[in-house]
Image: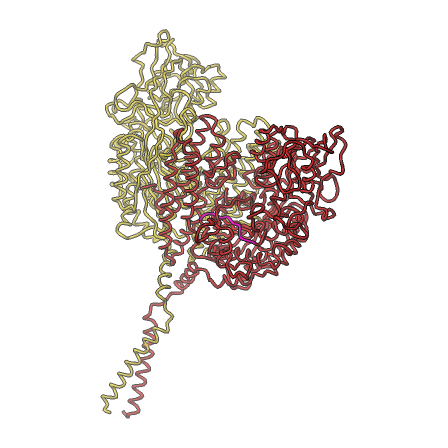
Chain colours: A red, B yellow
Amino acid sequence: MSKGRYILLAVVCGAVAFALGVIIGWFSRSGLTAEDRAALNKCLASIEDADETIRDHILENIDAQRIRENLRQLSQKPHMAGTPPDLEMAELLRRNWLENGLDEVRLVPYDVLLSYPPLGREGPNNTAVTVDGADPARQYEDTRTLHIEPEYQDDPDAVQFFNAYSPAGHPVGELVFANYGRLEDFDYLRQVGVNCTGKIVLMKYRSGGRGQKAKNAASAGAIGAILYPEPADTNEPGGKVYPDGWNLPGTGTERGGALLETGDPLTPGYPATDYAYRLSKDKSSVFPPIPLQPIAYNDAQKYLSHLDGDIAPAGWNGSLPITYRLGPGFTGDWAGRKVALHVYTNTTMRRVYNVVGMIKGEVEPDRYVMLGNHYDSWVQGAIDDTSSTAISLELTRVFGGLVKDGTWRPRRSIVFVAWGAEEFGLIGSHEYVEQFTGLIKDRAVAYINMDIGVGGNYTIFAGCSPSMVDIIYDTTKQVPDPDASLGKSVYETWSERDPTDADADVKIPNLDWPRVSTDYIPFGLRVGTPLFTFAYVHDQTNYSPRAIYPSYHTAYDNMDLMERFVDPDFTVHRAMARISGELIRRLADSLVLPYDCRKYWLSLSAFLQATEQDFGSMLYNQGISIDALRSAVYNYTAAAEGFHDRLQAIDRKDPLQIRSLNDQMVQVNTAFIDIHQPHHSNKHVLYSPSGCATNRSAAFPGIVRTMCGGPADDEGWEEVKKEVAAITSTIQSAADVISDVDSILGQS
Amino acid sequence: MSKGRYILLAVVCGAVAFALGVIIGWFSRSGLTAEDRAALNKCLASIEDADETIRDHILENIDAQRIRENLRQLSQKPHMAGTPPDLEMAELLRRNWLENGLDEVRLVPYDVLLSYPPLGREGPNNTAVTVDGADPARQYEDTRTLHIEPEYQDDPDAVQFFNAYSPAGHPVGELVFANYGRLEDFDYLRQVGVNCTGKIVLMKYRSGGRGQKAKNAASAGAIGAILYPEPADTNEPGGKVYPDGWNLPGTGTERGGALLETGDPLTPGYPATDYAYRLSKDKSSVFPPIPLQPIAYNDAQKYLSHLDGDIAPAGWNGSLPITYRLGPGFTGDWAGRKVALHVYTNTTMRRVYNVVGMIKGEVEPDRYVMLGNHYDSWVQGAIDDTSSTAISLELTRVFGGLVKDGTWRPRRSIVFVAWGAEEFGLIGSHEYVEQFTGLIKDRAVAYINMDIGVGGNYTIFAGCSPSMVDIIYDTTKQVPDPDASLGKSVYETWSERDPTDADADVKIPNLDWPRVSTDYIPFGLRVGTPLFTFAYVHDQTNYSPRAIYPSYHTAYDNMDLMERFVDPDFTVHRAMARISGELIRRLADSLVLPYDCRKYWLSLSAFLQATEQDFGSMLYNQGISIDALRSAVYNYTAAAEGFHDRLQAIDRKDPLQIRSLNDQMVQVNTAFIDIHQPHHSNKHVLYSPSGCATNRSAAFPGIVRTMCGGPADDEGWEEVKKEVAAITSTIQSAADVISDVDSILGQS
């Protein structure tokens, strides 16, 4: 063969060998079958952690000006629950949420008992009027109180001053001033010889529920109750009143529900569906027993200034330019006059709606991260709670947009809710949770609540389930303070402005179980869902309780006030939206839920300590031991430490192990529910209200309840004993949830 | 170059090219990163369906002779709950289960109220004795009844005849015969003028609970009660009595608990832990009100044959060779004599134990498949329920063996339980479920129960949750009938011997919600866990209720009787073990749970139909509509159909979708629980007992309860109305569980 042929041979050999090599190399590498490839893809999706770039997208896309426009549109007119503008708003939200890209949005209806004064500008007005003692029929028109903010008297949708669920009635009696209308206030009046029997009692708002004040007054013998917002409690000292500032003028007053319990009054424990069983109204014990009417502080001043009797003790004074006296009755010009209440408020059945929308999760659609706020308002409610509605509407746009354009879909489902009829007593949220208790218990991983979302511009005011503390701190570190000039995060200003311990070197923001009344309540107390509720508030160092602001529940809570005095550039709204948005994103998208169940230890040990301090010796004297309760708290603590260790060692490749540990982190919260607790909805052994008006102990509420006033007899002590065991058993059950799966074998 | 060199060059080129090709081929194939490989492996494990070869291993390895040896050892001596041999058995089971390969076994203790007559051979005996009417102190020793089977009178561990929780007492009175002691029996006596006041009432066992008979007797005025097993109800006609056959001789009688409610009497609703709250005994209403004593039928015959009064109606007769009369009092030689009861039975606190063991699941360890039976017996209890204990011990060997030698580990955890103190009132299982309600609700996918496991050799006697019907039919098709000569499956003989409809062309075995009282009750009625309870029974066509056999609760229920008359070659035991074993395997190992939630439709429509038939017009007349209830049933049905379609389309590559649908299939069962139901543990709206003694309607039990006896007043009708709404709401909640995840948005 020629040289050329040999070379050709070598090349051909080489080529053949090369091709053979490629083939052998290809096939010798273990490949994936199509089936395995499909499984792998599903699997990789099921263990995929959150795409953190979405965070920036969300934070950056939330648009302050859009929230402003939302609020302008939504707070345009009054939208009290059960009225046509209320339904219009529900429908508008549904439409907009769908347009914004949510997968599904529905109106969930309930038929509930609401309570109105005469509506529109017709019919009689709720008023308080002094009358001539000699001639009760004679009414002094000059002392007729304002029944609505004068600026709104021609707006047919603006409701007059009233307390919902007040009985209608026309009691006439001498006036007595009873400070906040607390039990101790009536005790004081009794001590100084002021008899409330047959009287009309004038009380300041704050330091207690409206209905409770009326109930306390009735217990003291009163036949009518008047409430007013004392400027010392309500207004910023030295500030101007609206429209020159955000303080409440003397021509408006706080409306508000006066039920003694939350939820639809006629369907306790069950949803107010069309087929629900309804109590007859006279069977319900949740209504205030006597007529109850709020008045503006100009009117209150007029009455107080004419009061007879002793000077009120120093602590009872407000800032009105008068001498506060106790009464009873008037002196001077008004001597002999009595006060007449004219209350025309009546209950009525109305259909109300929750707006509920969903972005279905990609991987775990049966796990829900829920965001809720109420959309009803007493009047326009720009602050309460349309600011939150405007924020959540913007969030549906940002989240919905990501879904619509295919950029992203969360791991878990996100559920947006706008609650109806919150102002009347958390009605929409109660009925919803009553209807879906099972689904919420088994599937909701978090409920985030906003109410009075932007009630100020100073700092965060928040509360949460113990497990959620860390993620909330983390999230607020991600979000810049609304005041960009500070160059700080929300977390930093929050920790400076409302620290848990003002003297600590490293300040930590104040964050505990929420102590306000809003829509997280049924989630927290009936189901035990991990929850967070928050708002932006003003600096409450000097005035007003944290969650309340001067124009609260008045017609002055409007867009103009918001834009001029609270959040002119809507950066506070944006910060709220960013916090909610980032929280929702993380909860919905994290492979492993960012919860820490060890944090219950703080609550548990505080309850235990208060129990020991406040009741320990009394219990001991009755032979009631709390040793087992103490052990249960320690068992919980140990179990939570063990769980935390397992969580650190989690196999992030194992979708079912992750799901299982996530489930445990949620279920440990719901495990603090004891279905045998006597109240139909308040079943949480740590956070339910004790219902004891005379003892404010921070001990376990069931112990405070059964110890309230001191058990009267052996049977009473048996109730205490039973409750101690029930709490012990419940805490132990919570420990079992986060113990190894063999906890079902009992203690070894 | 020489030719050789060219060839060498060609070879070298070829070799280099080949190597290069292999490398390029290898790398050009998209391979798996180590990380992806790990994920793939986890994923493949998480979606791996059951290895069906394990079925054969289990079916073949179950060894009849080992079960025989287990039973011989376990039934060697009496082991009544709370006695030393009872604890010895618990410890023996723990030891053996661990040796057999379970991962962990523990004794779970409870301190509960039991009830004993004097134990050992000392102290007084419970007896019924006739006395001279003239001189009540004089006892006729010739009429003293047997207090124990004579063959066992020297065995210190064999307890004498007694009814647990009978009050101690020594009533003296004339004897009356009251048939089964049902309400209608006492009505009859009243109608024919037999006054029970101050009398001792003799009643037959069956057709009602022991305590209920005493309660009925007390309501009729009786001061003492005597029970006896009527041979006509107990014994196989024409059969021989033990030791010549398995019929009950006239020298033994049925012991038994007489509580009016199940579970520890002092801790209703809560577990009887060391820290539990305990009612004082006089606060409990679950004890029979008058002394109660069982006697053998020889003694009953003696008493009955001397009875005075009218001849009993035909339906009251038994097969004793006497004329059955009603009394009151005796005639002939015995005229004037009265009957004295001497009951020394007393309650006592005892620690009892459940034995709980686990094989941890490989993939979903937090999902439990549970198998339980009680290990306590009144005497040796070879049938009741040591046969089941012997079976489950063999199952721990077979399953444990697979785990020990590394052959297999189930997907889900398997939990074996031997219950303590069942005979006293399902106490061990109640306390356990009360302690672990949350874990069981969230994690248990099935509870399988055996009781009186081998009480006969004729056919299966079973009950289950609707969802489980199919898998039970399937499983019994896999297992050959104990009588190999038939060449049939258990399913085939079952469908022939106990068909749902005897006239059907294709016979289907009788399988419905269980109607017997055993340890599934708290799982079923408090939690709603999917469950199955079963046993092998004799041919009950002609005698005795299905779940009962002649020597029930006597000392004749022993190994000898089992080996000679019930299951000589232990093939019935083996069939029971195979059914349990295969069920457990499938439930623990199937990727997709083999449940069909559509099957609730049958129950729901039957309840609805009975409600319409039995109460429809009464409800209509009161303006109580059941339209919404009907809608809820239809909504459930539609939801179940939709779910079934989704289940058919399940992506078997998606571990989380599978987990989610599996969870729904379990949760739909627990969704029929209504926590507001008034009974502390019976919360199931379909299967709870109505508690109504006078109306046996098959309508929804809450409706039967509230309609019981006809509501007395408006308030009573309100309760009915409320209950109709509660049931409607609960069924709707169950529908929501199996609807698409957007069911949380309400109906569209």
**Does residue B444 show up magenta in the picture?**
no
Q: Is residue A373 above or below residue B184?
A: below
Q: Is residue B145 above or below residue A578?
A: above
Indicate left or right for A640 with B743 as reference: left
**Does residue A460 show up magenta in the picture?**
yes
* Foreground of the two, A413 or A561: A561
Q: Residue at x 46, y 62 (%)?
A: A51
Q: Quadrant of the C terminus of chain A?
A: top left
Q: Is residue B470 above or below residue B183?
A: below
Question: For the magenta stretch, what is the residue range?
Answer: A458-466
* Foreground of the two, A333 or B359: A333
Indicate left or right for A387 with B88 as reference: right
Q: Residue at x 55, y 55 (%)?
A: A576
Q: Residue at x 57, y 42 (%)?
A: B631
Residue A695 on image: x %, y %: 50, 35
State which quadrant residue B547 falls in: top left
Q: Is residue B127 above or below residue B22?
A: above
Indicate left or right for B383 with B221 as reference: left
State which quadrant residue A31 falls in: bottom left
Residue A720 on image: x %, y %: 44, 32
State which quadrant residue B681 falls in: top left
Residue B507 visible, this angle: no
Residue A545 on image: x %, y %: 57, 45
Residue A114 visible, this angle: yes
